[in-house]
Amino acid sequence: MIDRYLIVDGHVHTFVSLEVALKIREAFNKMYDVQFENSGTGAIDEVLKNMKENSIDYTVTANFASPKIIHRNNMWSLDMAKEHKNLVPLVSFHPDMEGNLPELLEEYIGLGAKGVKFHPMAQGFKPYHAALEALYRHCNELGFVMQFHCGRVSNARLNEYADLSMILPVIDKYPGIPFILTHMADGNVEDVLWLSKNYENVYFDTSIVITGHPSLIEYNEPSWLDDDMVVEVINTIGAGRVLFGSDYPWGSPKHDIDRILKLKLDDGQKSLILGRNSYQLFKIES
């Protein structure tokens, strides 16, 4: 906790070892032309160390993978959360993965899964793919959280699959699913205002856009640099719709927390954004 605020980083990528983390980071940065300095590697030991140093109570592990290794990746995330009670695991799916997806989700939930993470651009599928329909219906019945990567990665756009226009058909069809759109819906203010007005089940995470990480502020085009504008958007849509997420190891939890704490918001608003919203949405158990 920081100044009595519960801190939940709702968007962190974790990797089994430093060796694996460095390989993935290098490949990702090359593919997406990431030119800013990463704040870390995402190796699981490093993530846990940073949580302790920065007084982060819980970290939501927003991992995803290709269809061949996605189940193994999900199981590793679930195992890590069993071992470390301050990790909150999301699981991912792909239209090409084997098995009955609703049944697989139930298995994951039984093992501690708290939500679903999709990165359609990196995973290479359209969000409204027919093979995902049964999974969406099941999540709609459960009210199970889905976190969608929304928009570009840094300034790269490999395909249109993470554009809001591609995700919107899913949001329209499943009002029972709480949807979290990362990167404040690609930092488009008009989209954020429109979505918050028309969809009660849509939330936004602050990652990359409401950042205090110097490298991102200098380089990343969608980042909101004006604190007054950030406060105005939050006051308009309500702090209950905004979740702190760092996108570590590309973003920086420490710098982002510091910036949110300095915003001209009241204690209740900061409390919701920094942790309470994620705590409730992901049904985190103390």
Image (cartoon, helix red, strand yellow):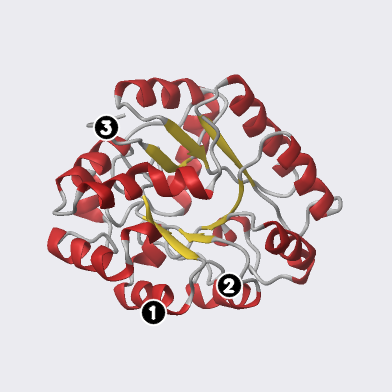
Tell me, yes or no, if residue 214 can be seen here.
no
Label 2 environment density (alpha carbons within 10 Å; few <14, some 14–19, many ≥20): some
Q: Between residue 17 and residue 13, name the one nearer to us.
A: 13
Q: Quadrant of the N terminus?
A: top left
| Secondary element type, mark 2 | helix
Alpha carbon separation for disc pair 1 and 3: 33 Å
What residue does disc 3 label? 4
Between disc 1 and disc 3, the foreground one is 3
In the displayed image of the protein, which residue is found farthest to the front?
268
Q: Which image quarter: residue 133? A: bottom right
- Disc 1 + disc 2, Cβ < 8 Å: no
Tell me, yes or no, if residue 107 can be seen here.
yes
- Residue at the image point whose x is 42% and y is 46% from the top: 29
Say left or right for 193 vs 73: left
In the displayed image of the protein, which residue is found farthest to the right?
99
Label 3 environment density (alpha carbons within 10 Å; few <14, some 14–19, many ≥20): few
Alpha carbon separation for disc pair 1 and 2: 13 Å
- Residue at the image point whose x is 50% and y is 39% from the top: 60
What residue does disc 2 label? 171
First-in-chain label (1 vs 2): 2
Say left or right for 274 vs 279: left
What amino acid is at disc 2?
Ile
